[in-house]
């Protein structure tokens, strides 16, 4: 019984890491296609409007990734 539970833990961990990697790759792609440097705007200039838009994009991509992984 314990091995069956461990299989689900390993699968969940692998899928979580895969989702995080895909999300980071998508963020880098979005960073490249936008006219401004998102990271510079977020960290140095503390632009709240861009932070909200970036958060919305990341949430949307995360929902798509989770739906694709979940099935």
Image (cartoon, rainbow, N blue to C red):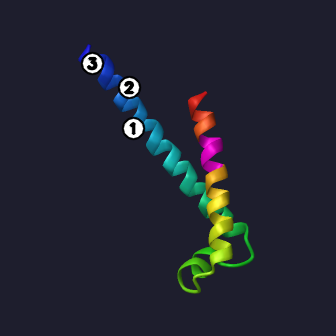
Percent x, y for residue 39? 58, 75
Q: CA distance from mark 1 to mark 2?
A: 8 Å
The residue sitting at 32% across, 17% down in the picture is: 4
The residue sitting at 58% across, 81% down in the picture is: 40
Q: Which residues are magenta?
A: 61-65
Percent x, y for residue 16? 46, 41
Check the image and name the residue furthest to the bottom. 45
Q: Quadrant of the N terminus?
A: top left
In the picture of the structure, the residue carrying the numbered disc 2 is 8
Q: CA distance from mark 3 to mark 2?
A: 9 Å
Check the image and name the residue furthest to the left. 2
Q: Secondary structure at mark 3?
A: helix
User: Which of the pair 30/1 is nearer the observer?
Assistant: 1
User: Which of the pair 24/43 is nearer the observer?
Assistant: 43
Q: CA distance from mark 3 to mark 1?
A: 15 Å
Q: Quadrant of the C terminus?
A: top right
Mark earlier in primary sequence (1, 2) = 2
In the picture of the structure, the residue carrying the numbered disc 1 is 13
Does the stretch in magenta take in 31?
no
């Amino acid at each position: 019984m314990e091995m069956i539970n461990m299989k689900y833990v390993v699968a969940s961990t692998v899928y979580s890491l895969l989702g995080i990697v895909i999300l980071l790759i998508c963020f880098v792609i979005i960073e490249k296609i936008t006219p401004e440097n998102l990271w510079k705007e977020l960290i140095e200039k503390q632009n709240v409007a861009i932070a909200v838009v970036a958060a919305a994009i990341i949430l949307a991509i995360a929902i798509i990734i989770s739906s694709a992984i979940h099935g």
